[in-house]
Amino acid sequence: MSNTMHDYAQRGAAARLTEIETEAAAIRRAFPELEAKSRKSRQAPAKAPSAASGPRPATLAPVAPKPKRKMSVAARRAISQAQKNRWAAQRAAAE
């Protein structure tokens, strides 16, 4: 990408960021309770429960991946032939 295109992209991104910040400020003014919630969510997460506070939840057992589905040669051949028939019908309709 040329420097000119990069410069235009950077200016556009900066202008859009300014628009977003202005819009966010308007939303915060309209809904001040959101600002309080957002400050709480940015605080450090609560401490993990200690052993004295009770038993820990059981961990989930890992789920085995599904076995890969295998298609028989006959099934692949049938699908291939059906697709070729569809393409032939499209070509015939286009002519």
Image (cartoon, rainbow, N blue to C red):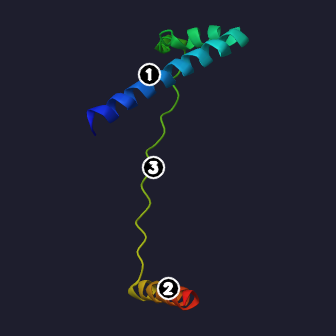
Mark 2: give few (<14), some (14-19) or many (20+) Cα within 10 Å: few
Label 1 sits on a secondary structure element that is helix
Residue kind at label 1, given as amino acid type: Ala
Q: Earlier in the sequence, mark 2 or mark 1?
A: 1
> Which mark's residue is nearer the viewer, 3 or 1?
1
Label 3 sits on a secondary structure element that is loop
Question: Residue 12 location in percent, x, y?
Answer: 45, 28
Residue kind at label 3, given as amino acid type: Val
Which quarter of the figure has residue 21?
A: top right
Instruction: Judge whether 68 appears above or below 38 on screen.
Output: below
Residue at position x 51%, y 9% in the image: 43
Which quarter of the figure is the N terminus placed in?
top left
In contact (CB < 8 Å): disc 3 and disc 1: no
| Left or right of 39 on screen, residue 70 | left
Residue pointed to by mark 3: 63
In contact (CB < 8 Å): disc 2 and disc 1: no
Label 2 sits on a secondary structure element that is helix
Residue 31 visible in the current orientation: no
Question: Residue 70 location in percent, x, y?
Answer: 40, 74
Residue kind at label 2, given as amino acid type: Trp
Residue 85 visible in the current orientation: yes
Residue pointed to by mark 2: 87
Using the image as rendered, state which of residue 26 and residue 36 is in the foreground: 26
Residue at position x 55%, y 20% in the image: 19
Residue pointed to by mark 1: 14
